[in-house]
Every structure is written in structure tokens, then in C-alpha cells.
Image (spheres, rainbow, N blue to C red):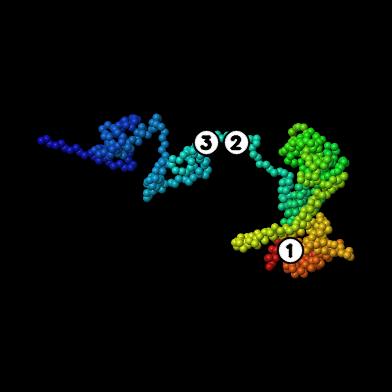
């Protein structure tokens, strides 16, 4: 037999490549750009020949000489050669742009569902010795200095489960600005004269101090008093402030003196039975009778008219057979054209005042009613006068600041029982006290005590302010004597010998608050009223005071108060301790420095 051929020598092993060595360049044919199914695969590496199938694929025919499902494996050297080819480093012209976002929302959510550790999946980057991943910057699109992100328009409606019904997409188009209509709502400022006057009076009273008195009192006197209601409002606010702040009673009394001298009533005291269409001024003599009124206004809600002149309006008021329709005044401004009383009918004729720039014929309107129904209509009408001068003089006197102030003082002083309501509530509390809890009982007792102290403070403040008005000359001495006798519940009568003596006019005992008011009033006016002119009356008063100081039926506090009053008169009304009064800032500063030096020395 023929000798066997010698075995082929084994190929020499390829030298190991170092990291610094370059791969040898091998000529490869260019790979045409064809669909994936038509690409002819490269020959298998020698070490992979005869390798069994790695599993079945799903792609069908892979290439020539390849079985379906056979996996092709390339070595590293061959793959590294591919990057040197131009066709592998240049983008084809007909290839669309594609961008891959690493770690997208879909992958991140799938990793969370699988329990991954975040990052690039599986927690690989957290192996020991590996570089820690960089944390994403807090804030993202909402970081400081960046523009706020645009709202999402994906139709989502916030939280909720799957298959949630999506709402309509947000509107991204241009927005038409709101159009201002002619009848749009506008806030209306309450600019009535009474409201404006009240705000100004309160503002001036809240700022009142000794240093600012001259400036603020001048502004007070400059207030234009347009009506009797405005005059009453000013007096009421000043009176309330004087009662609440008894230490400033002297300042408020001085303010009342200035207002009494400068406040004018000519602006609101009207003479009735005077026709402006027949006279040049209000003082032309006409046939009486004449009346005065202090609350005639041009703000009636319903009026009769319009008429062409004053005579037509008067004739319509006197026409008892026909009834003329009434119209709403609305926003029309009026001025007085004529005031008269004829056939026992009060007639007020007003002329319409048109806005500036508006033209039109003159229009007159009327308001009329029977004289005996003036009170029902809210009209303050005086008794008739034969002469206009006497009527005007009486009207100014009865509506002066001083008269209105005295009426206010009289009303406050003659209040029957300022504790009446409090006594009823206290009696109700005593009857139901056993049924109340301890907490409710304590709260109710404190509330009633606070109210009692407040009422007492107002009562004493009222007495002190009346006394200060007497010291300033606004109240006469005979009025003060009436006040003292009223508190003592006595009156002055003449006996058989013609001497004036005090006679008890009531069997009721003097109330506790009246005792306190008497002591307060004597301390306020004693130094002024205790003189030769009123010596007889003062002797009678203090005889009564001595009786009360010895009366065992009174509590010790009141008896000691009367005893102190007797000692004060014996000392010529000079108090042992200085009474609290309003102080300037300089006086307060000196007292503070004096107190500081006393503490340091002690």
C-alpha cells in the first residue's frame, strides 16, 4: 500500500496583540447598501467552523449556505476592521434622522417595575469600585433662572387610574382682551355730606392733644355746616369723646367755646313764606306770617312736576280738585326756588340744576302738604312770626351751637336710670346662677362688672364735662344749681318768713351713682361757684352734705367721700393730691426724667 501522506503542518499561532499594536489592514470588498435580507455575510472565522446552532431564530433565510435559525458570530478583530470602512463611518443620504434618548421614561418605568436600582438598569454602576453616577440636578425645567416650562397639552387630568377619560386639550390660540361695557359695575363711594363730615370730625378728635389743639380747633371751625343734622352730629361726637376721656374735658370744653363763637346757622335756617322770584334778597319785607325751619332739604324722594315756572308749581299745590302724578327725583340736583305757606299748605318749589354743559329749558318741581302734618312729614316748622327779623333772630338762636349743646347736656343729665338695663340683667343672672356651670358663672360676673364700670365712667364723665362747660361760660350758674338740687332730690322754696330753704321733693333715697355724681360735680365747679353771690346756696348744700356724712345708712365709702368734700371746701378747694389732667409731651417727659432720678437715688 502507498504510504500515507504526511500530515500538514499546523498553522503557526497568531502573535498576541498588545493594546498599543494596530490591527493589520486587510483588503475587504466594499459592502453594498442593500436591505438586510440581501446582505451576504462574511465568511465564518476559522475557530467558529463546525459550531452547532445556538438556537432557532425568527428571521427566516439569513444568507447563502446558512440554515434557518443559525446564529452568526464574528470575532473582535473582524468587527474592529469594519469601523475603518468609509461606508460604516458616513451616514447615507436617504437615511432619516433618528435620536436615541438613554434611560427614557419607558425604560425607567420598566426598571422600576422589575425592582431595578435605577440608573442604566440592574444596578451595574453601583458595583464596588465603580464610579458613582451623577445625580440629576434638582428642579429640572423649574430651576432658578430658567423660563417656566410651557403647560402640557396632552389632555391629562391629573391623578387617577387607568382608562381615565381625558378632557379637551388646552386652548393655545390668541386670547381676546375683555371689552369694557357701558353699564359695567363700578364701586360707588359714599360721598354724602353727613358721612364726609363724620369722618373728618372723628379724625380731628382722635388727633387732639394739647400741642395740636390750636391747629385742630381751627380746622374744626372751618367745617361747613350744611344742615341741622350735621350740627347735631358734630355735637354728639364731641360729647362722646369728652365723656370717654374725662382728663381731656377741659380741652373739649374749650373746643365747644370756639365752635359756639364761629359756627354759623345761616346756611341751613330757612325762612318760609318768602318767594325768591318776587324779592331781591331774603330780608325784603313781605306780608307775613313767617316761619323758620332748620331741616328743609332738596333731597326728597318723590316730587311733583315738571312745571315751567314757580307760579305753575304753586297753582298745582293749591289745586285740591286735581291730583298731579309724582315722579322719582333720582339723581336730579335741585335748589330752593320758593318757600311759602298758603291756605294752610306748606309749599316748597325747587328748580332743577342741570350738569355743566347740558342745555335745556328751566324745570320746576314742587313738594307740598298740610301745615298740621309737618311733623309727620319730618319737617321742623316754627310758630308763625309777624316780622321776618324776629323770625330770623329766633331761628338762629334756637338752632345755635350753644343751644343744641345745652339740649344735649340736659338729655344726658336727665336720663332716668342709666343702670336700669344692667339691674334687670343682674337680677336675671342671680336667679339662674345656681343652674350655671362654674366657668359660665365667672364669665358672666366679669361681663356684668365690666359693664357696670363702663356705665359709671360715662356717668361721671358726663358730670365732669357739664362742670367744665360751666367753667368756660357756656352754662350759667342757675343751671348748675338746678343740677345740684336734682341730685339731692330737693327744691328751693320760700318759708313763712320769706327765706329760701331746701325742701325734699321725693321720698326715694338718693341712688349710689347720684352720691358719686354730687361729689364729682362739687370737686369740678366748687372753686368757681363758691363765692359771695352764691354763698347762701352753698351753705344750704353743705349742710345737706354734713348730714349725709353722718348718715349710718350709707356705706363707709360714700360717707368718707362726703367728709373729704367738706375738708376740701375748708381748704379753699385746694386738693392734697393733684388731680389727673391732660398733659403735654414736655410735661410727660419731665415726669419720666424725675421718676428715673428718684429710682436711681433710691
Between residues 475 and 53, which one lies in front from this camera angle?
Answer: 475
Q: Answer whether residue 401 is visible to the viewer in this image.
A: yes
Name the residue at 45% across, 45% down.
136
Q: Answer whether residue 450 is visible to the viewer in this image.
A: no
Give the CA distance from mark 1 to mark 2.
Answer: 70 Å
Q: Secondary structure at mark 1?
A: helix
Residue 521 drawn above or below residue 93 = below
Residue 345, percent across and down? 81, 41
First of labels 1, 2 by sequence position: 2
Q: Which quarter of the figure has residue 120?
A: top left
First of labels 3, 2 by sequence position: 3
Q: Is residue 459 left or right of residue 135?
A: right
Q: Which residue is mark 3?
A: 171
Give the CA distance from mark 1 to mark 3.
Answer: 79 Å
The answer to the question of whether label 1 and label 3 lie on touching residues, with beta carbons closer than 8 A, is no
Q: Foreground mark, 1 or 3?
A: 1
Residue 487 drawn above or below residue 106 = below
Q: Residues within 10 Å of mark 1 (few under 14, many from 20)?
A: few
Q: Secondary structure at mark 2?
A: loop
Q: Residue furthest front?
A: 321
Between residues 437 and 575, which one lies in front from this camera angle?
Answer: 437
Q: Which residue is mark 2?
A: 178
Q: Which residue is mark 1?
A: 512
Amino acid at each position: 500500500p502507498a504510504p500515507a501522506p504526511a500530515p500538514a503542518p499546523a498553522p503557526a499561532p497568531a502573535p498576541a496583540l498588545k493594546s498599543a499594536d494596530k490591527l493589520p489592514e486587510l483588503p475587504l470588498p466594499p459592502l453594498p447598501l442593500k436591505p438586510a435580507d440581501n446582505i451576504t455575510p462574511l465568511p465564518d472565522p476559522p475557530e467558529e467552523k463546525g459550531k452547532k446552532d445556538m438556537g432557532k431564530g425568527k428571521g427566516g433565510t439569513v444568507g447563502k449556505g446558512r440554515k434557518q435559525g443559525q446564529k452568526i458570530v464574528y470575532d473582535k478583530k473582524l468587527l474592529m476592521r469594519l469601523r475603518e470602512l468609509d461606508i460604516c463611518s458616513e451616514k447615507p443620504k436617504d437615511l432619516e434622522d433618528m435620536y436615541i434618548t438613554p434611560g427614557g421614561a419607558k425604560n425607567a418605568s420598566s426598571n422600576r417595575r422589575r425592582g431595578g436600582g435605577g440608573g442604566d438598569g440592574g444596578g451595574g454602576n453601583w458595583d464596588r469600585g465603580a464610579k458613582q453616577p451623577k445625580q440629576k440636578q434638582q428642579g429640572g425645567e423649574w430651576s432658578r433662572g430658567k423660563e417656566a416650562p410651557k403647560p402640557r397639552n396632552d389632555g391629562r387630568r391629573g391623578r387617577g387610574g387607568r382608562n381615565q377619560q381625558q378632557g379637551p386639550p388646552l386652548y393655545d390660540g390668541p386670547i381676546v382682551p375683555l371689552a369694557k361695557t357701558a353699564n359695567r359695575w363700578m364701586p360707588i363711594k359714599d360721598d354724602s355730606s353727613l358721612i364726609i363730615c363724620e369722618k373728618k370730625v372723628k379724625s380731628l378728635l382722635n388727633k387732639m392733644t394739647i400741642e395740636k389743639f390750636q391747629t385742630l380747633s381751627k380746622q374744626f371751625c372751618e367745617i361747613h355746616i350744611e344742615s341741622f343734622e350735621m350740627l347735631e352730629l358734630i355735637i354728639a361726637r364731641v360729647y362722646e369723646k369728652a365723656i370717654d376721656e374725662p382728663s381731656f374735658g377741659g380741652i373739649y370744653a374749650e373746643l365747644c367755646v370756639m365752635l359756639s363763637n364761629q359756627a354759623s346757622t345761616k346756611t341751613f335756617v330757612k325762612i318760609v313764606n318768602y318767594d325768591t322770584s318776587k324779592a331781591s334778597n331774603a330780608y325784603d319785607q313781605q306780608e307775613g306770617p313767617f316761619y323758620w325751619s332748620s331741616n328743609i332739604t332738596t333731597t326728597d324722594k318723590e316730587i311733583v312736576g315738571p312745571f315751567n315756572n314757580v307760579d305753575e308749581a304753586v297753582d298745582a299745590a293749591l289745586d285740591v280738585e286735581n291730583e298731579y302724578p309724582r315722579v322719582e327725583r333720582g339723581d336730579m340736583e335741585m335748589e330752593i326756588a320758593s318757600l311759602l305757606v298758603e291756605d294752610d299748605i306748606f309749599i316748597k318749589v325747587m328748580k332743577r340744576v342741570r350738569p355743566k354743559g347740558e342745555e335745556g329749558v328751566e324745570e320746576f318741581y314742587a313738594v307740598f302738604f298740610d301745615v298740621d302734618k309737618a311733623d309727620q312729614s319730618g319737617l321742623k316748622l316754627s310758630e308763625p312770626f309777624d316780622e321776618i327779623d324776629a323770625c330770623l333772630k329766633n331761628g338762629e338762636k334756637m338752632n345755635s351751637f350753644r343751644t343744641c349743646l345745652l339740649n344735649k347736656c340736659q338729655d344726658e343729665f336727665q336720663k332716668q336710670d342709666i343702670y336700669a338695663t344692667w339691674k334687670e340683667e343682674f337680677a336675671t343672672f342671680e336667679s339662674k346662677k345656681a343652674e350655671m356651670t362654674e366657668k359660665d358663672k365667672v364669665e358672666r360676673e366679669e361681663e356684668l362688672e365690666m359693664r357696670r364700670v363702663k356705665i359709671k365712667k360715662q356717668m361721671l364723665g358726663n358730670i365732669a364735662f357739664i362742670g367744665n362747660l360751666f367753667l368756660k361760660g357756656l352754662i350759667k350758674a342757675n343751671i348748675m344749681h338746678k343740677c345740684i338740687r336734682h341730685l339731692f332730690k330737693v327744691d328751693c322754696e320760700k318759708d313763712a318768713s320769706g327765706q329760701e330753704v331746701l325742701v325734699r321733693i321725693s321720698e326715694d333715697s338718693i341712688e349710689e351713682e347720684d352720691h358719686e355724681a354730687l361729689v364729682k360735680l362739687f370737686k369740678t365747679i366748687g372753686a368757681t361757684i363758691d363765692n359771695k353771690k352764691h354763698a347762701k346756696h352753698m351753705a344750704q348744700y353743705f349742710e345737706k352734705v354734713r348730714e349725709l356724712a353722718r348718715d349710718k345708712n350709707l356705706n363707709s365709702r360714700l360717707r368718707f367721700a362726703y367728709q373729704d368734700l367738706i375738708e376740701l371746701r375748708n381748704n379753699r378747694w385746694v386738693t392734697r393730691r393733684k388731680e389727673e389732667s391732660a398733659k403735654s409731651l414736655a410735661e410727660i417727659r419731665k415726669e419720666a426724667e424725675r421718676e428715673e432720678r428718684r429710682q436711681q437715688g433710691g
